């Protein structure tokens, strides 16, 4: 039977009345994409989403382990669950308290699931990154009365085959094309939390995207993986090839991919940026450091010179392309000279924006075992220097947008200092805010041509020239 708001659904031996799930997602797009899959599976067990934690029957944390801060946030939220369980409503008919079930999934749960279950009384079950599609079974087990279990096994099959599940109704969809990471950069926990690389077959991805475009109104697709440049290696296929095949799908307007590793960028990918009409004018290519000796200690397998050549090639292939990056400040034993090299690289690379982080030691990684002499203060100061330098570069680049017209796909409406503004993203991945022509005008998921009227390092404002509606 189709689940509804009022009727119960029978699954196996159990009745599932309408219930509410509250979910908190930490970390990267991969995790957000997994959360969407989880929601889609749970709707089959009669769950609907709630934004009010106190209404929830089921609470799920989809965790991230990439830096200590992400871990700490999760532990503090998990701590609060004790109170939530203690204060759960009493059912007036039975006199019993609501049985709130609390679960943790994602990257922390993958490596520490069993310990978490033992340590936190309020946690009912934990599940890893490779069993997201079994969430229905796990929730069933919890409602069948099974207590305190962890499922953190890896999928050992050769094939990686899934169908993208979307629940949001927006024209933008994430599509996973490769899972895992084999790179083992010395600072990074991801290969331990996401396992080995495995690609979906090209034919399957093309079919999947065609279905999303034809039946779910999707117009923009973000191809996802920790290292999408490794896509297809195991099957004699490549990301460049995949992009050129997706290019043929009528109704698909924009294509993006993330994240890339510079070592694996191939010539056919550069060519795809030259030839594709749908590939967005943006590339996120994490460099991590501008110092060759630090890059070596990070086990990144490229030099700053190679990186700069690569982005020059990309910009020659598509002169409209903007490039963004990730930087780690204060890698173990980084010297002032090595830090200066990163500041110089920022000047040379002219990134459109960066995500920058202070190094955070992750247990089990090579970098965490290095005898490090840097203090938190030094790391914090270097991070600020990197961010200040980038903001100056960014402000100058953004000034160059003023007076030019960009086509944006509008994502949402918000209030800024009491004024209603809509926000959309350009092909080059810049957010643009603009006021509606009339207060009641609805631009949700419209394609709009916007002329940029002002820009700062962090925000770009424009005025509407043309509203093209839901199809460009
Ligand atoms: N796969 C991508 C790549 O190769 O760059 C992204 C991986 S990670 C999810 C996102 C970013 O987090 C990395 O690019 C890196 O800058 C940062 N990061 C990873 N481990 C870190 C650590 N131990 N400390 C600080 N930042 C870290
Ligand atoms: Fe982590 Fe490196 Fe893999 Fe990116 S490529 S996920 S930084 S190990
Ligand atoms: Fe975090 Fe896992 Fe992503 S560690 S960044 S959620 S792959």
Image (cartoon, rainbow, N blue to C red):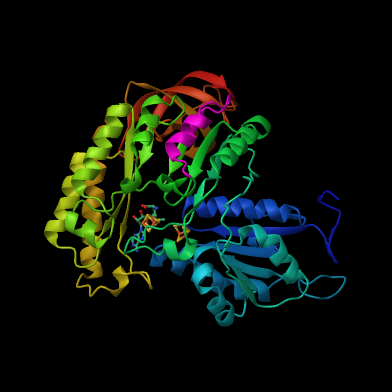
Looking at the image, residue 95 sits to the left or right of residue 198; the answer is right
Quarter of the image where ligand 2 sits: bottom left
* Quarter where residue 53 is shown: bottom right
Of residues 356 and 363, the one nearer the viewer is 363
Residue at coordinates 58% horizontally, 38% vertically from top-left?
A: 203
Tally the marks. 0
Residue at coordinates 28% horizontally, 59% vertically from top-left?
A: 299
Residue 200 vs 452, above or below: the answer is below
Residue at coordinates 26% horizontally, 43% vertically from top-left?
A: 391
Residue 417: image location, x then y, percent: 45, 39
Looking at the image, residue 395 sits to the left or right of residue 89; the answer is left
Determine if residue 7 is in view: yes
* Quarter where residue 271 is shown: top left
Of residues 146 and 454, the one nearer the viewer is 146
Determine if residue 353 is in view: no
Give yes or no for residue 246 being in the magenta stretch: yes
Placement of the C terminus among the 4 image quadrants: top right
Residue 306 vs 456, above or below: the answer is below
Residue at coordinates 39% horizontally, 67% vertically from top-left?
A: 68
Of residues 261 and 14, the one nearer the viewer is 261
Residue 418: image location, x then y, percent: 49, 38
Give yes or no for residue 153 being in the magenta stretch: no
In the rendered image, the residue lying farthest to the front is 236
| Magenta span | 236-255
């Amino acid at each position: 039977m189709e689940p509804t708001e009022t009727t119960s659904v029978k699954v196996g031996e159990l009745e599932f009345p309408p219930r509410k799930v509250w979910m908190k997602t930490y970390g990267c797009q991969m995790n957000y994409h997994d959360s969407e899959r989880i929601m889609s599976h749970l709707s089959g067990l009669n769950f609907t989403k709630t934004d009010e934690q106190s209404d929830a029957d089921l609470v799920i944390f989809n965790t991230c382990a990439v830096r200590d801060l992400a871990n700490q946030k999760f532990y503090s939220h998990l701590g609060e669950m004790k109170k939530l369980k203690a204060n759960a409503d009493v059912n007036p008919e039975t006199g019993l308290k609501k049985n709130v079930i609390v679960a943790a999934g994602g990257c922390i749960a993958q490596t520490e699931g069993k310990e978490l279950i033992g340590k936190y009384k309020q946690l009912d079950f934990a599940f890893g990154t490779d069993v997201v599609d079994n969430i229905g079974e796990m929730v069933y087990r919890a409602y069948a009365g099974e207590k305190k279990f962890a499922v953190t096994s890896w999928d050992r099959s050769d094939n990686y085959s899934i169908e993208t599940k979307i629940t949001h109704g927006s024209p933008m969809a994430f599509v996973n094309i490769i899972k895992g990471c084999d790179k083992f950069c010395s600072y990074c926990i991801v290969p331990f939390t996401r396992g080995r690389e495995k690609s979906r077959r090209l034919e399957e991805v093309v079919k999947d995207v065609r279905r999303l475009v034809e039946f779910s109104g999707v117009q923009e697709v973000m191809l996802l993986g920790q290292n999408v440049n490794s896509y297809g290696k195991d099957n004699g296929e490549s990301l460049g090839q995949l992009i050129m095949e997706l290019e043929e799908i009528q109704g698909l307007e924009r294509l993006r991919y993330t994240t890339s590793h510079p070592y694996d960028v191939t010539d056919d990918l550069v060519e795809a940026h030259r030839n594709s009409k749908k590939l967005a004018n943006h590339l996120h290519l994490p460099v991590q450091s501008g110092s060759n000796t630090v890059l070596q200690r990070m086990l990144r397998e490229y030099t700053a010179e190679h990186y700069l050549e690569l982005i020059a090639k990309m910009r020659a292939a598509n002169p409209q392309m903007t490039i963004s990056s990730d930087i780690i400040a204060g890698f173990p034993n980084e010297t002032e000279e090595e830090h200066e090299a990163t500041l110089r690289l920022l000047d040379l690379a002219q990134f459109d924006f960066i995500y920058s982080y202070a190094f955070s030691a992750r247990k089990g990684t090579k970098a965490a075992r290095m005898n490090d002499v840097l203090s938190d203060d030094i790391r914090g100061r270097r991070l600020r220097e990197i961010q200040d330098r980038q903001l100056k570069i960014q402000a100058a680049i953004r000034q160059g947008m003023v007076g030019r017209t960009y086509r944006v796909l509008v994502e949402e409406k918000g209030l800024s200092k009491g004024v209603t503004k809509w926000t959309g993203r350009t092909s080059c991945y810049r957010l643009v805010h603009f006021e509606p022509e009339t207060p009641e005008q609805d631009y949700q998921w419209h394609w709009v041509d916007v002329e940029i009227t002002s820009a700062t390092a962090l925000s770009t404002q424009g005025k509407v020239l043309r509203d093209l509606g839901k199809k460009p």
